[in-house]
Amino acid sequence: MDKKYLIKTYGCQMNVHESEKLAGMLQSLGYTETDIDKDADVIVFNTCCIRDGAEQKIYAHIGALKSLKKTNPNLVIAICGCMTQVKNRPETIKKKFPFVNIIFGTHNINKFKNYLIEFNSNHQYICDIWDEAKGIDEHIDMYRTSGKNAWVNISYGCNNFCTYCIVPYVRGRERSRDFDDIIKECKELIADGYKYITLLGQNVNSYGNDINDDNITFANLLRTVATLEGDFVVKFMTSHPKDLNSDVIDVIASEPKLAKVIHLPIQSGSNKVLKDMNRNYTREKYLAKIEEIRAKIPNCYISTDIIVGFPGETDEDFLDTYNIVNQIRYDGVFAFMYSKRDGTIAAAMDNQIDIKIKRERVNKLLQLSKDITKQLNQESIGKQYRIIVDSFDDAKNEYIGYTDSGKTIIVKKIDELTINNFYNVTITEYTKNKLYGVIRR
Ligand code: SAH
Ligand code: SF4
Ligand code: F3S
C-alpha cells in the first residue's frame, strides 16, 4: 500500500535539516512525500519555540487537523522539535489536542522511526522527551530536500545563554561533531553534485571548543572543507560576534570556494542592552569586527539579527541600534520584537516593553533596512559577483542566477550558459527591484 507523509517545518535551518532526517526515516519505511494534508497517512510537526508567535502559529496549525483526524482516523500525527522540550509543553499539547499520537524531543529525533513502528503496531500514544543528548548518532537515513544546497551539522546545542534565548534550554549544551565525520560527509555531498555546502551550528565559531585538540577549530574546518576538490561553494551559519576571530576572517578572505557572506547577529547597538543580554561584546568591538571583515573581504555580504524591545530598552538604546544599522549598512536585517520565554533570565526582568513600542521600533528598523537595500542595489552597478545559473526563461530569453548570498541576478542570453554552473558576473543595471548582469570571462 502506498503510504504518504507530510512534514511541517518551523524555525531555523537546523530544523529544516532535521526534517530531512525525519523524511529519511519515513522513506526508509516505504512512505512517500505529499504536500496535501488529506492525502497524508503521517503528519509530523517539527516545531520551533524561539518566540511566542511561532508557538501560537503551530498550535493553530495542529488544531486545524482536528476535522481531518475525524474523517481519517488512521492519520498519525507526530510532534517534535524545540517546542516539545519546553517544560510542560507536551502535556499542554496533548491536553489541547488529544488526537496527537506521538510526541518526541530534539535529543531523540533519530528514534522517530522506532516510535512510528511501535505506534503502527499497537496504536498507543507515545510521549518520549529526553533531558539531554546521548552522543551524536552518525547512522542517519537522510532525504535531502534543499535542492543544490546540502546542510551539514558541525555542532549541536549552545552554551551561550543569551538572557532572552530559549535555545540552550531546548537544544542542550554545545556538542561538536567529529572533524573527520564532517569532512567525510562533505566529500560525499560534493561527489553527489551538491553545489553549496552549508555548515550548521548555533555558534559555528566555537566549533571544537569541547574537543581536546588545539587543531580542531572552526577556521581549520572551514579551510579543510573549502580546499576539497570539486566545483562547489561553502557557507555557514551562525556566527557569534564574540567568537568570530581573525583566523576565520582570513580563511574566508583567502579561500575562493568560501562564500563571501557572513551573518553576524548584533541583537542591539546599545552597550547597556548588550550587557543585559549577556552577549559578551560591546558596540565598539562589534564595529571593529565589521571593519576587519570589510578591509579583508571587499564586497562581503553582511547580514544581522536584531531584537527590539528587550526589557529596559529606552528610546536612546533603540537609537543606538538604529544608528549602528545605518552606519554599517547591512545587506540584510532580520528584526524581531522581543518575546518573553519562560525560564530565561530576561523573562524575569522588570521593565518589559509595551507591544506598541516594540512594533514601532521594529517597523522603523525594517523601513531603514529597506532603504539601505535599495541604495546598495543601486550602488552595486559595476560590482562583481559569483553566481550559479539556476534556470532559463524562454519567454524573456534570459538566465536566472543567484549570488552566494541568494540574490537574484538576471543575465540576458548572449552566449549559451550551462545550468548549475558558476560564473562571474558584473552588475550592469538595476530596475524595478531586479539586478541584471553580464558574464565576465
Ligand atoms: N544561534 C543563532 C540563532 C539564534 S535564534 C544566533 O545566536 O545568532 C535566531 C534569532 O532569533 C536570534 O539571533 C535573535 O535575534 C532571535 N531571538 C532569539 N530569542 C528571541 C526572543 N526571545 N525574542 C525575540 N527574538 C529572539
Ligand atoms: Fe540563543 Fe545566544 Fe545561543 Fe544564539 S548564541 S542560540 S541567541 S543563546
Ligand atoms: Fe526555533 Fe529551535 Fe531553531 S527554537 S530557531 S527551531 S533551534
Image (cartoon, helix red, strand yellow):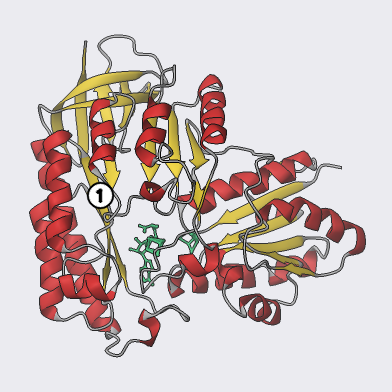
Residue located farthest toward the bottom when viewing the structure as drawn: 350
Query: Residue 112 appears at what percent x and percent y?
Result: 73, 54
Where does the image place residue 177, in percent across and percent down from the top left?
Answer: 54, 44
Mark 1 secondary-structure assignment = strand
**What residue is shown with label 1?**
303
> In which quadrant of the rendered view does residue 431 lie?
top left
The residue at 60%/44% (across/down) is 20
Work out which residue is located at the far right of the displayed protein and give it.
Answer: 122
Q: Is residue 355 above or below residue 185?
A: below
Q: Position of residue 187 (x, y in %)?
A: 53, 24
Which is nearer the eye, 228 or 329? 228
Q: Is residue 298 visible?
A: no
- Residue type pointed to by label 1: Ser
Using the rendered image of the protein, determine whether residue 188 is visible from the camera's viewpoint.
Answer: yes
Quadrant location, the N terminus: top right
Quadrant assignment, res 253 = top left
In the depicted view, which residue is nearer to us: 402 or 290? 290
Q: Residue at x 53, y 35 (%)?
A: 182
Judge by depth and name the residue closer to the eye, 103 or 248: 248
206 sits to left or right of 116? left
- Does mark 1 have its CB less than 8 Å from ligand 1? no
For the point 21% across and 10% down, which residue is it?
441
Q: Residue 217 appears at what percent x and percent y?
A: 39, 40
Give me the residue at 14% from left, 75% from top: 317
